[in-house]
Amino acid sequence: MKKRNSLVIPCIFSALLFTAATSVFSLNIKAEGQSSNVIEVNNDEEKAISKALESAQSGDTIIIHAGEYKDQIRITTSDLTIKADEGAVLTEEGMDLEDKSLNLSDTMVYIEADDVSISGLEITGLKHSNKKSGIVPKGIYVAPGSDNVSIVNCTVHDMGIGKYDSKFNKDTDRYNAHGILAEATPDNPITNLKIKKCTLYNLKVGNSETLVVNGNVDNFEISGNYIYNCDNIGIDAIGFEQTKKEDPAETVELDRARNGRIYENIVKNISSKGNVTYEGDKCAAGIYVDGGRGIRVFDNYVSNCDIGIEVATEHKDRTVTGIIVTNNTLIKNDALAGIVIGGSDIDENGFAESCVFMNNTVYNTENSCVAIQLAKDPDNVIKNNLFIADRDAEVYYEDEESYGKLGEGVGNSIVDNMFNQDISEDYPKVMKENKTFKFKNISVPSKDTKDTNVVVTVKSPEAIKGYGSTGTQIK
């Protein structure tokens, strides 16, 4: 929903102007033989963007000029391009979702169409605080069956849960919100989705996630986004939430995000510490693949989250499969671990299989660099990573209480990594084919900046050449 410039029209065509007391939007017809139009939107009248969308036809471009728009929009016409100028803000600030007289939706931008591109729009202000309502505020929602949708350079901030009830019982599972959600069902997929260069911050999302693809979402790209200061998972790719144990295997297999790429994102300061739905537990991942398949997670920077990158499934008798996690830089994700593999509860969760973790740099000052949970597959490969456990941290941890001792990483291929701690006494089999190095110090960016420059000083730089991420400078 961005800018528009008027077009010069040949004299054989007339410009159609739609007016109220002042111009709300203008429709400019292109030259003969070109069927698409450019619709320019100004904030001169209520619901101006919605009115432009109602008039738009396939192939049109809508340009939204700078200004504040109190509106909630539905995009149901395919083959639309929506561009917003800098300073174009879609807001429901001060509006109460509980006030039925306002007839508000719980979604600021609703997309149910193919071949839609939306860029540059700022979205804010939609909140609710009633845990009994079941309302789920969303900045952008991509509905099932929407193919070839592109969301670029949009900003979603300061929305979601308005205020938590301190007496909230987490078992009611009623506080939920999303910054961006793409959700598909086994019989109604989303394909070729792109979410790029967006910024999401200051979102309270309760039990839910900041930016998420859920279910039958195939061939997606989540790249170049900046996500920070949110109270649950930063980026999530989910499976198995819409199917039951008794459903046919082919239906279950469709109920998972798959064949995606999550890369070049910066995720900072993601924690559920103040989120009452977790009763103060700190367990929010910067990036989480929960039951997905065939997803590459690479070239990301994740810092100051409860968990850096987690690959697991929350559904028993299901697996998270074929996730490739490479060349990520994970800094001070100290509440649990930089990398977590496998579900945490053998009675409720599933295993990680055929997942690869290579050439990542992981630095922790508390808890552990890598935590092995429900994972015991020889095709799970952990290799060429640089693990730095500083202060009170340890490089490696196995959760034995949840499922019984697996036997020092038995079943997983944990080979040729660089640890700054010798763990041979506690985990002799794990250490057998790994190496240690002498760590001196590290320089990491502030948690409040977009900077990702990490410098590690070691005794012998040549000894750790080829380990860790390319985003790590070794001295």
Image (cartoon, helix red, strand yellow):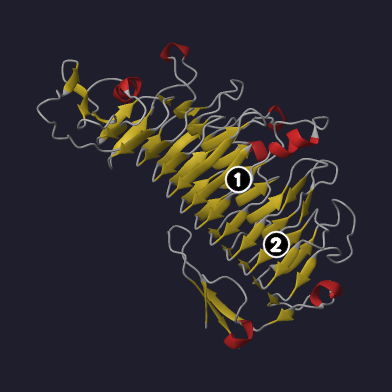
In front of the other: label 1 or label 2? 2
Quadrant assignment, res 433: bottom right
- In the displayed orientation, state which residue is furthest to the top: 101
> Circle 1 sits on which residue?
236
User: 10 Å neighbourhood of mark 1: few (<14), some, or many (≥20)?
Assistant: many
Quadrant assignment, res 367: bottom right
User: 10 Å neighbourhood of mark 2: few (<14), some, or many (≥20)?
Assistant: some
Image vertical order of residue 67 relative to residue 437, above or below: above
- Residue at 33% in and 35% down: 89
Quadrant assignment, res 177: top right
Q: Amino acid at mark 1?
A: Asp
Q: Is residue 214 left or right of residue 242?
A: left
Which percent across, then down, holds residue 117?
A: 40, 38
Q: Amino acid at mark 2?
A: Val
Which percent across, then down, holds residue 55?
A: 31, 20
Image vertical order of residue 466 relative to residue 244, above or below: below
Kind of element beneath mark 2: strand
Q: Is residue 393 left or right of residue 211?
A: right
Mark sitting on residue 356: 2
Quadrant where the N terminus sits is top left
> What's the CA distance linking mark 1 and mark 2?
18 Å
